[in-house]
Amino acid sequence: MKVLLTAEQIQEGVNSLAQRIEQYYQGKPVTLVGVLIGSIVLLADLIRRLNIPLRVGLVQARRYRGRNTQPGPLAIDLEVLTAEVRGRHVLLVDDIFDTGQTLWELIPQLDELAPLSIRTAVLLRKQGRKQVDLEPDFVGFEIPNVFVVGYGLDYDDMYRNLPYVATLDNEDLK
Ligand code: XMP
């Protein structure tokens, strides 16, 4: 395992994200909506740095697979989105923007709940992987095209608890 971003670097990055987000949403009713599970660490750190009135919700994005096991459409589990969205600005919070497919598919589904606007914030944006016509509005760090874990990001549901972001070596991937 190799550390890509130290805990200190991440905290500075989250501070900077929070400053930009706080400025943008001054005077606007905002609901931060975290995409489960990877966003929970960022969400917890971010909301404690935002000195504006806000609400918090979560969505579970499930990708249904067809019989041939090809990835199917993404569906939001609205059961967990208990926070008010209608008539409020929504900031979707995710751990990483990789191909962009997840946020690209979530946005129109959330839009059906009639928010005033939808913006996106991610801790990490992988370079050279984008497949959709969407740029995240608030980005903590640009990273190279490598598989990363830590600070909410997992490999086989492990490593989410690391306070830093690291790349995995081949022996970690067994
Ligand atoms: P897309 O391609 O939809 O990807 O932008 C977003 C989701 O894919 C997962 N992902 C990763 N998870 N290390 C991880 O632990 C990675 O390097 C990585 N790249 C993508 C993640 O769940 C993210 O929300």
Image: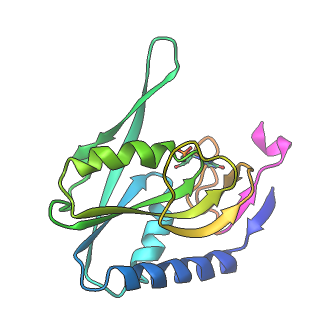
Q: For residue 31, which quarter of the picture?
A: bottom left
- In this rendered view, identify the residue nearer to me: 45 or 71: 71
- Location of the C terminus (image quadrant): top right
Residue 22, image x, y percentages:
39, 83
* Residue at position x 61%, y 59% in the image: 125
Residue 34 shown left or right of residue 31 in the figure: right
Residue 169, image x, y percentages:
83, 48
- In this rendered view, identify the residue nearer to me: 79 or 95: 95
Q: For residue 163, which quarter of the picture?
A: bottom right
Magenta segment range?
A: 164-174
Residue 104, image x, y percentages:
43, 46
- In this rendered view, identify the residue nearer to me: 122 or 5: 122
For this orientation, the residue located farthest to the left is: 87
- Location of the N terminus (image quadrant): bottom right
* Residue at position x 41%, y 53% in the image: 35
In the figure, 61 relative to 49: above or below? above
Residue 123 colored magenta? Answer: no
For this orientation, the residue located farthest to the top is: 67
* Residue at position x 56%, y 56% in the image: 96
* Residue at position x 71%, y 48% in the image: 147
- In this rendered view, identify the residue nearer to me: 82 or 23: 23
In the figure, 88 relative to 52: above or below? above
- What's the image's color scheme? rainbow
Residue 151, image x, y percentages:
59, 63
